[in-house]
Image (tube, grey):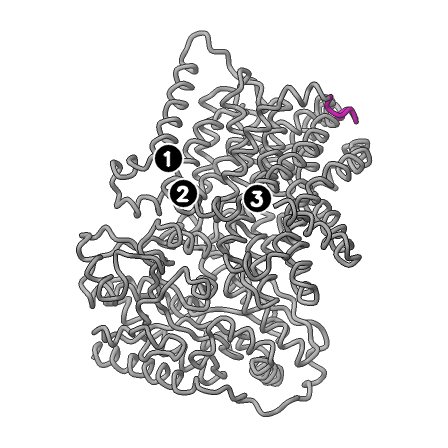
Amino acid sequence: MFDNFIAGTTALFGDPVSIAIFIFGVLGGMLFGAIPGVSMLTLAAILLPFTAGLEPAQGVMLFAVIYCTGTYGGAITAILFNIPGAPENAPTAFDGYPMTKKGMAGKAVGAAVLCSAIGGTASALLMMTATEPLAQWAISNIGPPEIFALVFFGLAVASSVGGNTIWKGWMSVLLGLMIATIGQDPVGGINRYNFGLSDLAAGIAFVPAILGFFAVSEIFVQAEKKAFGKYNAPKLSVDFPSFAELWAHKIAVVRSIIVGFFCGILPGIGATLAAFMGYGEAVRWSKEKEKFGTGKLEGVISSETANNAATGAAMIPLLALGLPGGALTAIMVAVFQFHDMEPGPLVFYNSPELIWVVFAAMFYANVSILFIGLIETKTIMQLLRIPFHYLAPMILMLASIGAYIGRGLVLDVVVMFGAGIVGFLLRRSGYSIAGIVLGIILGKIGEQNFAQGMQMVHYDLVTYMSRPICFILIVAGAITLATSIYKALSPSNNPQKQA
Amino acid sequence: MKIMKALSASLLVAGLVSGASTAALAFECKVKEASMAKPDGFPDRALTMIVPYGPGGGSGQVAAAMAQAVTELTGVNINRDHKPGGSGSVGTTAYMATPADGYNVLEHIDDASSAHALDSTKVNPAVDLIPLVISQVTFSQIYIRSNEDRFTDWPSFVAWVKAQGGKATIANVSAEGSMERVTMKFITDATGMEIQQISFDKGAPRYGALLGGQVDALFEQPGDVRKFLDAGNFKPILTVFNERPAAFADVPTHMEMGMTFEPLLRFRGFYVNANAPQDRVEWLKWAFQRAYCQDSYQKYNESKFMTVIDSYRDTEGAKKLINATVSQYRDVYKKMGLEVK
């Protein structure tokens, strides 16, 4: 393996064109990842036709690098402005933005940089070690029933985040789950709650909903404070987390690497579920559950480690089996095909040099997040100096563009502002916008896999629970729910603080 | 009367399918004119192609290949605008809202025809749109894992499925009224087997389900699983087509296995609004039909098993295929008890 890695490194950095492509991918991924709506996917779609003129290894490497750095890029705006660059950065905003409001933006961004680099690098190393056996294990043991059980477990664990009370947290999640049912059902293609609008047949898109609930509702909240003279500008801080602070979260990092890698390896799941699960696990194991959603460093660490840990993992089913894990890896299939190649088992035999150039590039891209991320952070944090009356319209404009550009539908801009208003009102009442977003994202994944899973077990719960992974996750989720109900009913329970 | 109508529709489709297979032996470009003067300078800027599916799937790929071929041929750039969702309805609705000036074209698959068959208020691809070219026509197959030892061919598969008492599973895209669900109904009715269809809307989980043994079989088109065929992961055991394509000479057809229904085809093509200026439409027809002959496009189609039967339909051929398909689906839907509007 080491020899192959050295060979890949030599091929990557021994060619000026490859170096230029690598640097372009690192910077482009970070930039596009950081702009809400205009995600790394947008950059990938723009670049796709141009890859026909590149060497196959250069083309695939470019997209792999964009995937690594783009996944990190969205964390910055999530932390500084409550605008997740992509759905996989949404859990980062749960605690990252409250940290900014407390004047701890530097710590949050620094942790995001470091943990993205650690998660991605660890994932790249695991990917290099055992791509083929891991891919085979994943598809043989994890099907729709297991993925639904995983989602159920994730919802049970993270459902109470951000609400004033556990009941409000759950109500928020249920609202998100209801919103997720808008559009065609994932199995029969039957329209639900679309009121005759064909645009709604595709359901509520993640990005406009996230932008609305996070960014727009936050603008409204701050505008209200400004109007009543209660506005406090976020304090600028470039104090990075200390080594001791980071070392104190070493277990959270390792846990998120495992969770993120596991989610990333599942075809069609990817970094979004990884981030939510990583965050959820941090909540579950924490002794200070009530502090999540209020600006806890561990929330940022867990989310950003997990989503980047999913990047290397997502390459495993793609390269070993030809199964893309998400939208960006699906575009990478087209890059292979431009060069008369198909990702899958034969690539390892026919083009091992390509595989190792890609592996090496992903490794170095994750390492470069650390260095470039820390350099850019000092600069980007200066954005917090912009007065609110200039910043708010800029954010609304950026968010509107981000909402529209994904599908080019005015409906998505309407959804974004609608979500902003609903989010604003619900936050005033102590409900959790994090829970709503959690419900929307996990609801879509969960419903589809529940329907498929039930078909696979012929609607027989005994058969379903006889699958070991399903049994473990469903029971663990049920215990978590029961425990939280017990705690909520306990007289000694103190209401949680609002995010 | 209903039976006669269904029969005539089936015969028409049969004729179209049969014609397709006999023409598959050698490629011949049907558009002889290598160039065509632009009508009043049209187009003097890039075209926009709305693709109602994501960039990585079969539609996204064929849109990219055709856009590249048209640009190579004419020098006119084509910007692709992906609007996925709602089985193509989101993109179609968005397309119909764009100006009918010839600068906007639409990529779509047979889902547009089946959607119109189910609900006549939806866009009729042969009337509301003008097909510029249909550039991919393909058939479906049933696949099993190559290392499968419970069954090895179609007869043993059917026998095994029947022995499972309805617990066998097959992965497909089985949205209500889809080509996949209708064809599976034909197959299960004809064989008397009961099989649970598991619907996956994305290719990767669908193929992974068969690779990992989560399901027993897969319903798919050969181009979409070529890499798994080349790698020896999947093995076709049934071709849903009237005769054996040369590339799958060892695989029996449904007809040979005693199923007499007419196969439904998967087809992908390019359209322009029927209200677009006629001279512009003529130029677009030439550009897209001639682009089909470009080496780059033919190479792409070959890589997707789209040359084993004749994938080409010009405007008139496309209209015939669409009309026959709509008629066939309508009859089938009525027989299935679906509400046809």
Of callouts 3 and 1, the N-terminal one: 3
Residue A155, x across and y down, in percent: 45, 31
Query: Does residue A399 appear in the picture of this structure?
Result: no
Query: Does residue A61 appear in the picture of this structure?
Result: yes
Q: Please determine whether, in this image, residue A254 is positioned above or below residue A125.
A: above
Front-most of B281 and A44? A44
**Residue hosting label 1:** A469
Mark 2–mark 1 CB contact (< 8 Å): yes
Q: Say left or right for B265 vs A333.
A: left
Q: Is residue A395 magenta?
A: no
**Residue hosting label 2:** A142
**Residue hosting label 3:** A127
Q: Please determine whether, in this image, residue A104 is positioned above or below residue A257.
A: above
Of callouts 2 and 1, the N-terminal one: 2
Circle 3 chain: A
Front-most of A172 and A105? A105
Q: Secondary structure at mark 2?
A: loop
Disc 3 marks a residue whose amino acid type is Met
Q: Secondary structure at mark 1?
A: helix
Front-most of A149 and B88? A149
Mark 2, Cα crowd under 10 Å, few <14 / some 14-19 / many 20+, is: many
Q: CA distance from mark 3 to mark 1?
A: 23 Å
Q: CA distance from mark 2 to mark 1?
A: 8 Å
Mark 3, Cα crowd under 10 Å, few <14 / some 14-19 / many 20+, is: many
Magenta residues span A233-242
Disc 2 marks a residue whose amino acid type is Ile
Residue at x 35%, y 35% (from the top left corner) = A470
Q: Secondary structure at mark 3?
A: helix
- Outermost residue toward the front? A3
Disc 1 marks a residue whose amino acid type is Ile
